[in-house]
Image (tube, coloured by chain):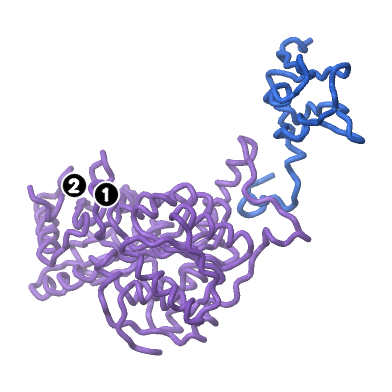
Chain colours: A blue, B purple
Amino acid sequence: MSWREMPRGSVVPKGGTATEYKTGGWRSNRPIHNKETCVHCLTCWICCPDSAIVVKDGKFVEINYDFCKGCGICSKVCPTKPSSIAMKPESEFKK
Amino acid sequence: MTRTALTGNDAVAEALRQVNPDVAAVYPITPQTEMMHRFAEFVADGLVETEFVTVESEHSALSATIGASAAGSRAVTATSSQGLALMWEMLHIASGLRLPIVMPVVNRALSAPINIHCDHSDTMYSRDSGWIQIFSENSQEAYDNTIQAFRIAEHMSVRLPVMVTLDGFIISHTMETVDLLEDDEVRKFVGDFEAEYSLLDVDHPITVGSLFLPDYYFEAKRQEHEALINSFAVIEEVGKLYGELSGRKSGFFEAYRLDDAQLALVVMGSAAGTATEVVDELRGEGKPVGLLKIRLYRPFPTASITKVLARIPVVGVLDRAIAFGLEGGPVYHDVRSALYGQTTILQSFIAGLGGRDITPGHIRTMFDILADAKKRGKADDKTRFIGVRE
């Protein structure tokens, strides 16, 4: 788009545009959820700064890796011993 | 029209009363304080419908003004010196978001050492912030410029914030004769404010202040630059219309006795009044001197200035601020660019820092230096500091 056609003042003419910006690409450590030990307390869901914990019917379903930046807060706040979310380097997932 | 006596601060407050903006968010700072103090009285007395927001700092003052403007209201603030410095990051946000905020700035020196008096160092540091900057010579011009600022800022081909400056104490606290327009004339001249959008309009959601990485930031800034360039035509037109209404002309600058001048001085702000007197005295002594008073500093009217100054053999530029580490003040360098490739001999002067008076004697000294430069066929390489203890 030419600078001549852009909305004035960089105003984006709609709301909720953060969902279109995938921040998952910033991640260097990936949270891995352990279904066996998770107690579905949803503390991780409350604490996740990117709303990347997907919950359905009061249960932890999955992590949305499009938005998870890999901060590790979910892993830290998990009350189970050991944590039901393990942080693994992204390099382990590279093909 | 009403003829009255007002200080510069009161004259600007009066203009703001007549415009009746939706929101004013301000923090007091000498020498601006009396301006918005007076305006607060208008609010308290019910003479304006303005929502008056008393904030905890200038950073907050401009932040609140930006929020109010983005919400679709006509919003103003005002400041001086350290206050303007504290607004620094918000200045760029106001212009980047293309918000038509009007902000009178009462020029005051920057610390350290602490000083409350006039020089132009505060506004000079914001010259590249994307704001339109209009300088005033006296209370009358401060009043006239404030009214015009709304119409310029809000013009659909501009939509940029405008700073109207007046010299601290010299204008802000000096009572002068001022001709005021009638309230209805001013309201008709500025018209109703039409917001392009409102952040509070939940039926039409928008995103303001979003992230533009290497993909589009460049385009946003290119567009902003164009808005400044577009504002030349609008500022000229608004000046013309205001002239028809008030009988007082406002151009990019005022050329005084320049037509046959051999020596000319370029000044901004209150020093122009002193310089005009001295030009008349020197003309009386048969000396071919003239004056260029710049009113519009940003955008800088380079081409127009080239046209009026290029045929004058020797030109001096008086700055009321230092560009540290560089010979010649900021205005000098802008004029020098305008005269690039011309044969004009150009001399830089710096005077009046921290409220040091610029006297008729100082202006005479400057013209003597210019006359000497003409004789020698060259100027000094270095800035001449006038009125400093050597």
Q: Quadrant of residue A78?
A: top right
Let me know if marks 2 and 1 both belong to one chain. Answer: yes
Q: Quadrant of residue B294?
A: bottom left
In the image, farthest residue toward the right? A57
**SS for callout 2:** loop
Point out which mark residue A94 bears: none
State the image coordinates of residue B289 (x, y, percent, origin top left).
Answer: 17, 67
State the image coordinates of residue B23 (x, y, percent, origin top left).
Answer: 54, 68
Q: Earlier in the sequence, mark 2 or mark 1?
A: 1
Q: In the drawing, does residue A35 fall left or right of residue B222? A: right
| Residue A50 shows up from this direction | yes
- Point 37% across, 70% down: residue: B35
Question: What residue does disc 2 label?
Answer: B383
Q: In the drawing, does residue B83 fall left or right of residue B62? A: left
Q: Amino acid at mark 2?
A: Thr
- Point 10% across, 59% down: residue: B365
- Point 13% across, 67% down: residue: B360
Marks 2,1: beta carbons within 8 A: yes
**SS for callout 1:** loop
Q: Along the line of sight, which residue is nearer the eye, B116 or B349?
A: B116
State the image coordinates of residue B13 (x, y, percent, origin top left).
Answer: 41, 74
For label 2, count other residues whose C-alpha is less than 10 Å away and answer few (under 14), some (14-19) or many (20+). many
Chain designation of label 2? B
Q: In the drawing, does residue B104 fall left or right of residue B213? A: left
State the image coordinates of residue B19 (x, y, percent, origin top left).
Answer: 50, 77
Q: Along the line of sight, which residue is nearer the eye, B289 or B87?
A: B87
In the rendered image, the vertical position of residue B54 relative to residue B389, given as above or below: below
Question: What residue does disc 1 label?
Answer: B329
Q: CA distance from mark 2 to mark 1?
A: 8 Å
Q: Quadrant of residue B51?
A: bottom right
| Residue B304 shows up from this direction | no
